[in-house]
Amino acid sequence: MPRADRKTDSGYAGSLARILARQDRHEEAEKAYRLAIADQPERVEWYVGLAEALLAQKRHEAAVPPLVEATTLDPSRADLFNQLGLIEMHPLHAEDAFRAAIEAAPQNPIYHANLAVCLIDQWRLEDAEECLVEAIRIDPRDLSYPTDLGHLLMDMGRMAEAEGMFRRTLWSVNHNAIIDGPAWELYNDGRFDAADDLFDRRQRTSDDDYLAWSYRGMGTALLAMGQDREAVVAFRGAISIRPDEPTFHSELASALSVTGRGRMALRALQRAEGLRSAQKTGKMPPSRRPVTLGK
């Protein structure tokens, strides 16, 4: 006997959408969430789920309207404003979203750091500096914020302040970079694999990436201020923590060249080119500086 037509059960549609999303069937989940929204437009979670399904399909612009609707329905959801800021293409709209996140949760340092990145994109560097200073005040233990602030100060030409910020980052933890000794004798002889083995024996920490880039930033600032030998020490610190980063080796080469140590500079350039070649051929992953955006 034929069954009578019935109106879609929005609760069922939402539950089905969640199941489909967990199974990575994002296109089907999108359709189910749209059905749920049509029947229950007041439910914030359906808009959030729809946005997540669209983001999983890399349809970032399409995810903006449901996130806007979700934040309109529940303006206390700082996490949704933050996510909206991360995917907004227009920098001013992104800034508005991050500021709304901060208004809803002013003690979350991630929102201040994300706003800083947005302001840097607009070349509003002084405003970005204030945001990073606030992030550091809220969470002084997170090394990403002073590291980012140090690089920002360098972009502003304030090298002495940048060097001080990087030095503060490095001394805030018990770092143990190798800046001298047998590893560097092997390195200067071109025996890079053997040097890496010695570098790898140092105690590893979860902050290694930020420490390495802080050493690099300090070296760059010292080099700009004419403190060439101190810059060599800083670049060596970066390499001992991340010997697979070609940028550190090429910048060490520049510092060594300035101090008149041409043979050592040549070795550092050889190492940098070898690492870049390995990255291009896929033998090792490309490297990049860690950033706070999207945390």
Image (spheres, grey):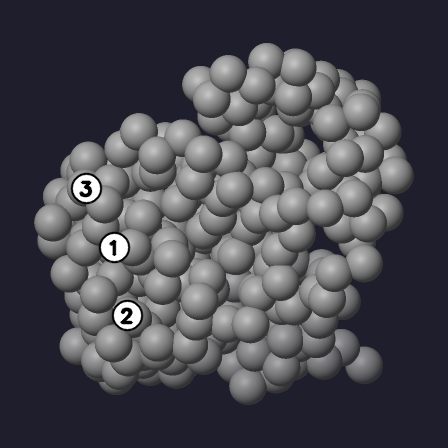
Numbered tag placed on residue 158 in the rendering: 3
Q: From the viewer's side, name the closer residue of 31 and 188.
A: 188
Residue identified by numbered label 2: 135
Label 3: which secondary element: loop
Q: Quadrant of residue 203?
A: bottom right
The residue under the point 13% across, 43% down is 124
Tag nearer the camera, 1 or 3: 3
Task: State the CA–CA distance, disc 2 to disc 1.
Answer: 9 Å
Q: Is residue 136 left or right of residue 288?
A: left
* Residue at image coords 26%, 66%: 112
Give the spatial CA distance, label 1 vs label 3: 17 Å
The residue shown at (21%, 70%) is 134
Disc 1 marks which residue? 116
Q: Depth-wise, is mark 2 or mark 1 nearer the camera?
A: 2
Q: Can you say which quadrant of the picture contains the N terminus?
A: bottom right
The percent coordinates of residue 274 (x first, y second) are 75, 21
Nearest to N terminus: mark 2 or mark 1: 1
Q: Amino acid at mark 2?
A: Ala
In the displayed structure, does residue 61 sit left or right of residue 284?
left
Amino acid type, residue under disc 1 in the picture: Ala
Neighbor class of circle 1 (other Cα within 10 Å; few <14, some 14-19, many 20+) is: many
Q: Contact (CB < 8 A) between labels 2 and 1? A: yes
Q: Label 1: state its secondary structure.
A: helix
- Taking 108 as reference, is 164 above or below it? above
- The disc, 1 or 3, on the residue closer to the chain's N-terminal end is 1
